Image: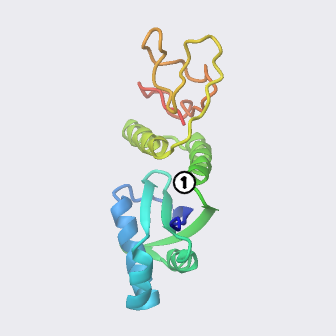
């Protein structure tokens, strides 16, 4: 039996005016990609590519997107994504940040890229909540466990930093070996980890 081999893209949608469209979601990105494949490669190309194309993650604040496709359709999907120039009648540029063979390696790059962007952004409370929810979605995608460096025995031992096992309280940001970007979201009530 042959394994179905996928490739994962980490893409950034760069808006011309600099204002991000926060109403765009995974479904909207997938629709634009399907339209681009249909327009540039016709019915046959669309039928081949669309069987395996899936938007795994889209963050409306940082405009990062994780896209999955089959290894055989890699160049076709990459080309179609690069040829998208408008989304909802607004001019955009889609640039690829990382191409990976696994979701985990693509996700690591997305977490690091998100952390760097979040440090630079000044966010309103509503945007902070949206960023926190988008980050939790990104963390939930991963299957790998990020080890905790807490040696006292009470630290988190799961893939997400949830709560201290002894007291059931949220851990202090940065107290364990997990990555935090709570500095950008310091007014948020729940801890955010990656």
Q: Position of residue 193 (x, y in %)?
A: 52, 32
111 versus 13 height, above or below = above
Helix or strand or loop: what does disc 1 sit on? helix
Q: Which residue is mark 1?
A: 103
Going 59% across and 42% down the picture, which residue do you hit?
115
- Looking at the rendered structure, the number of numbered marks drawn on it comes to 1
Going 47% across and 14% down the picture, which residue do you hit?
165
Model colouring: rainbow
Image quadrant occupied by the C terminus: top right
Q: Residues within 10 Å of mark 1 (few under 14, many from 20)?
A: many
Residue 17 can be seen, yes or no: no
Q: Position of residue 158 (x, y in %)?
A: 51, 28
Residue farthest front in this picture: 1
185 versus 98 height, above or below = above
Residue 81 can be seen, yes or no: yes
Q: Position of residue 180 (x, y in %)?
A: 57, 31
Of 152 and 193, which appears nearest the observer?
A: 152
Going 60% across and 47% down the picture, which residue do you hit?
108
Of 12 and 157, which appears nearest the observer?
A: 157
Going 54% across and 54% down the picture, which residue do you hit?
103
Q: Position of residue 119 (x, y in %)?
A: 59, 40
Q: Quadrant of residue 94?
A: bottom right
């Amino acid at each position: 039996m042959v394994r179905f081999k996928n490739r994962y893209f980490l893409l950034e949608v760069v808006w011309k005016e600099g204002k991000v469209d926060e109403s765009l979601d995974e479904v909207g990105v997938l629709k634009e990609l399907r339209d681009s494949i249909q327009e540039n490669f016709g019915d046959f190309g669309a039928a081949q590519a669309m069987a395996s194309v899936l938007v795994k993650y889209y963050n409306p604040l940082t405009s990062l997107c994780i896209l999955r496709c089959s290894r055989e359709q890699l160049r076709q999907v990459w080309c179609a994504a690069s040829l998208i120039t408008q989304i909802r009648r607004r001019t955009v540029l889609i640039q690829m940040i990382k191409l990976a063979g696994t979701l985990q390696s693509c996700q690591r790059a997305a977490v690091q890229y998100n952390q760097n962007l979040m440090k630079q952004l000044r966010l309103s409370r509503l945007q902070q909540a949206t960023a926190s929810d988008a980050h939790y979605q990104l963390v939930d995608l991963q299957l790998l466990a990020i080890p905790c460096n807490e040696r006292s025995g009470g630290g988190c031992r799961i893939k997400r930093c949830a709560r201290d096992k002894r007291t059931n309280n949220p851990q202090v940001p940065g107290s364990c070996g997990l990555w935090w970007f709570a500095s950008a979201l310091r007014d948020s009530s729940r801890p955010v980890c990656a």
